[in-house]
Amino acid sequence: MTILSACGKISYRLAIKKETETNKMFSLETANIEKAINNAKALHPKVKMIEFGTYEVTGSKGNTYTVKCYRAHGEKIVECNCATRDGIACKHSMAAVSLHIAMAAQRGH
């Protein structure tokens, strides 16, 4: 799936993480993100940048999640420590990705 953002095209690709690790992740290449984007738009989670690539997202029930956006092995990876299954995009990660894209554009990335 490809979407258009303020700074161009973004593709989404699934990446799997070891079951022993606590953060769930997906690669910004082929993960199905449409439902997560719609949930984020409907719930308006609050996103706070801790540092570039690390974001704190307050969910709809007041829980706080940490989302990390980074590149590894040529792929754009997003991790969230919520209970969503590995490889599935969550609303917290999509909210953080929108801020990450804006910040990356300002930084010239």
Image (tube, rainbow, N blue to C red):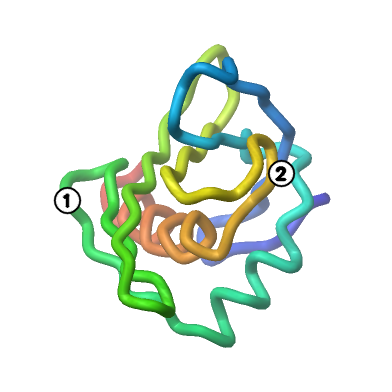
Question: Where residue 50 sits: x, y (%)?
Answer: 16, 50
Q: Quadrant location of residue 101?
A: bottom left
Which label's residue is closer to the chain start, 1 or 2? Answer: 2
Instruction: Assess disc 1: are there few (<14), some (14-19) or many (≥20) residues with their C-alpha within 10 Å of its C-alpha.
Output: few
Direction from residue 99 to residue 37 in the image, left or right:
right
Q: Single out the residue that lies furthest toward the left.
A: 50
* Depicted 55 relative to depicted 43: above or below: above
Check residue 81 in the rendering and tell me which mark sits there, or answer none: none
* Depicted 74 relative to depicted 47: above or below: above
Q: Quadrant location of residue 85?
A: top right
Q: Single out the residue that lies furthest toward the right.
A: 1
At horizontal 53% and vertical 60% (from top left) the residue drawn is 94
Question: Where residue 8 sits: x, y (%)?
Answer: 60, 55
Which residue position holds label 1? 50
Direction from residue 16 to residue 64 in the image, left or right:
left
Check whether the beta carbons of the residues at disc 1 and disc 2 lie within 8 A of each other: no
At horizontal 69% and vertical 46% (from top left) the residue drawn is 88
Check residue 11 in the rendering and tell me which mark sits there, or answer none: 2
> Camera-side residue: 106 or 44?
44
Please name the amino acid that badge 1 sits on.
Ile
At horizontal 47% and vertical 55% (from top left) the residue drawn is 97
Question: Where residue 75 sits: x, y (%)?
Answer: 59, 25
Please name the amino acid that badge 2 sits on.
Ser
Instruction: Assess disc 2: are there few (<14), some (14-19) or many (≥20) residues with their C-alpha within 10 Å of its C-alpha.
Output: some
> Camera-side residue: 55 or 80?
80
Q: Quadrant location of residue 16?
A: top right
Quadrant of image for the C terminus? top left
At horizontal 44% and vertical 30% (from top left) the residue drawn is 22
Local secondary structure at mark 2:
strand
Question: Where residue 3 sits: x, y (%)?
Answer: 73, 59
> Camera-side residue: 105 or 49?
49
